[in-house]
Amino acid sequence: MSHLPILPVLIPFLTAGLLLATHGMGTGFKRAVSSISVVALVVVSLLLLIESGDGSIRAYRLGDWPAPFGIVLVTDRLAAIMVTLTAMLAAAALLTALSGTDTEGRHFHVFFHLQIAGLNGAFLTGDLFNLFVFFEILLLASYALLAHGGGVTRTRAGLAYVVLNLAGSALFLIALGLTYGTLGTLNMADLARVLPMVAFGDQALVRTTLALLVAVFVLKAALLPLGFWLPHVYTAATLPVAVLFVIMTKVGIYALLRVSTIGFVTAPFTADLLQPWLAWLAIGTIALGSIGALAAARLSVVVANIVMISSGTLLLGVAAGGVNAYAAMLYYLVNTTVVTAGLFLLADRVSRQRGAVADFFEKGPRMAGILATGGAYLILAVAASGVPPLSGFLGKIMVMQSLQETSTAVGAWAAMLLSGFVVALVLARAASRFFWEPGLPDEEASTPEPVRQISSNTGSTDAALSGMIACAIVIVLGAAPISDYMRATADQLARPAGYVEAILGDSPAIRRERRP
């Protein structure tokens, strides 16, 4: 168990290396290796979740170098939650890839596992430089995964995505250099010790430096006005990639939450760094996502905009701060991650059942298996729109209650209520086209624009969809223990001294030299 914290990074890294070294092997071998790796990752993530449940924070020092100098991985409740979510999405994405999507291009499985390693590393790392390293790993893998399968649509979306993230990476590197130059450390726990000791004359520079870091994180989180890339990228990607991309925006939100709770709150000149602009931009992000969903002509585009709405909602919790807001946003984070992944899978099922018309809001042939598809659609649509009694309603109510004492409460409540109404309206409109209108013969169905080819081997995709629906139901049935775990996680976040103590201890063996 002592090496458990490194396994969520090590397992996918080793898998990617093995698959690259044996690239000449057949598809069956690659699928078997990937399946074994993902099953092992799910088991390890659940063990981490259980181990972190006692409230302990464990620091894993690579090479046994003391912090803040060595590479350190940290497992607490929040990191365990994010790693478990990543493992769940990885399992669902791999199941969908087994339907034939993995054979549409080269090295799918290699980049798939590299992205998982990057995601888990970002959630577990304890310093900003290695956060940058893991960001680059997951981004490089995502570039290749987005282009997987080829096509003009993916190429156009990929170019915009690459250019934007290269700019973000350059900004991140500049911010890291300035942070180390001004504070002498990149260790997140060490920030809590250093920031209160910054001289008055350096505070403006340090505040500007940290603002650059925030800009990088909100870019990853698709915050307005930097979130225009999200709907194009998510709808252009193949289905397994879109499912795995659901967790991508949460990386930026996680990083912002982690840095703000550990570092920003420890010094008066950085305590208000996210106020009040973050809340208002989050409200704008919700509004933009709602408009995008209302204007969408495809179910998959609606789902991509729901991801944007969820990012805005989660960032409202980050902006509000406090135990109640953190607990509410974490419960909502689990729900929205599972539900949006399920909706992407459902959009694919609808596409397969309707032939050339796919998931466009156009009259098409009547679907086979309409009862099963309709039942899945009803559960996920209710959970996504925040209608009682499913977990989407519980999550939104918790977030709204946590915001009632903030200065932006009225705007936040209005945005969340209206976005829920818009999502419910759009999904109801889609349901009327998919399930209630008389179908057309296959030969009369037309498609407004080219859509990807759908494999006929879809049993694994349906299994992944069933798994996501089961998870959404479990989130409702287990609302009390899950919310208790989230509150304990939020309480741990609100007391950063425990995190600092676990990493640095009372008396580090080697102390950093400070600037005179």
Image (cartoon, grey):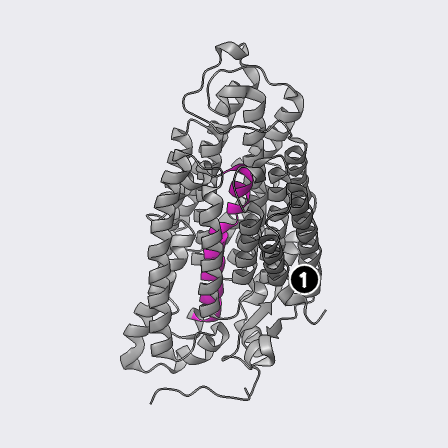
Instruction: For label 1, count other residues whose C-alpha is less than 10 Å away and answer few (under 14), some (14-19) or many (20+).
Output: many
Q: Amino acid at mark 1?
A: Leu
Q: For residue 121, which quarter of the picture? A: bottom right
Q: Residue furthest front?
A: 24
The reply to whether residue 322 is visible in this rendering is yes
Q: Main secondary structure of the magenta part?
A: helix
Q: Position of residue 169 (x, y in %)?
A: 37, 59
* Mark 1 lies on residue: 48
Residue at image point 46% right, 22% down? 361
Count of numbered marks: 1
Q: Quadrant of the C terminus?
A: bottom left
Q: Position of residue 413 (x, y in %)?
A: 44, 44
Q: Position of residue 429 (x, y in %)?
A: 48, 23
**Is 449 displayed left or right of 364 in the figure?**
left
Residue at image point 47% right, 74% down? 187
The answer to whether residue 430 is above or below residue 190 is above
Q: Is residue 255 magenta?
A: yes
The answer to whether residue 75 is above or below residue 424 is below
Label 1, secondary structure: give it: helix
Q: Which residues are magenta?
A: 238-263
The reply to whether residue 317 is visible in this rendering is no
Q: Is residue 284 magenta?
A: no
**Is 357 displayed left or right of 38 in the figure?**
left
**Is 483 displayed left or right of 166 in the figure?**
right
Q: Nearer the viewer, residue 320 or 2?
A: 2
Q: Position of residue 337 (x, y in %)?
A: 56, 46
**Is 90 displayed left or right of 225 in the figure?**
right
The answer to whether residue 182 is above or below residue 141 is below
Q: Quadrant of the N terminus?
A: bottom right
Q: Nearer the viewer, residue 507 or 410?
A: 507
